[in-house]
Image (cartoon, rainbow, N blue to C red):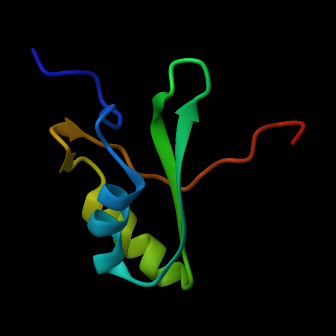
Amino acid sequence: MAPPPGLSFRTTEENLRGAFEKFGQLTEVHLVMDKVAKRPRGFAFVSYAVEEEAKSAIEGMHGKFLDGRVIFVEVAKRRPGL
């Protein structure tokens, strides 16, 4: 059985940068951490300087393997109230 989708606990911001920078100029890489467990929560945010590069990254990385896990890549959605 395959593990559930999402980032591996072994994924680092450097791994993310390496995987996503081939699609364009990254302006931010943020791996969301669990403050109690001191490990990644399984998701991250990457931002690009140009919208077309972000679209290319979504197309190029969605459903691909990163650090042994299938990842889902989509446009971030605003949370209500933030």
What's the residue at 45%, 84% (across, down)? Answer: 25
Question: Outermost residue, top direction?
Answer: 1
Q: Is residue 40 above or below residue 57?
A: above
Q: Position of residue 12 (x, y in %)?
A: 36, 49
Disc count in the image?
A: 0
Q: Is 38 situated left or right of 65 in this image?
A: right
**Closest to the observer: 61 or 35?**
35
Work out whether 77 lies above or below 18. above
Asked where in the image residue 30 lies, by quadrant, the reply is bottom right
Residue at 33%, 31% (x, y): give it. Answer: 9
Q: Is residue 77 left or right of residue 73?
A: right
Residue 68 appears in which quarter of the rendering? top left
- Is residue 43 shown above or below 53? above
* The N terminus lies in quadrant: top left
39 or 57, which is in the foreground? Answer: 39
Q: Tell me the residue at 74%/47% (across/down).
A: 78
Residue for point 24% across, 47% down: 63
**Image coords of residue 72 (percent x, y):** 36, 44
Above or below, 46 relative to 35: below
| Lateral position of residue 77 relative to residue 9, left or right | right
Q: Quadrant of residue 51?
A: bottom right
Give the quadrant of the C terminus.
Answer: top right
Residue 62 placement (x, y as % from top left) = 30, 53
Q: Residue furthest left?
A: 1
Would residue 81 be found to the left or right of residue 19 on screen?
Answer: right
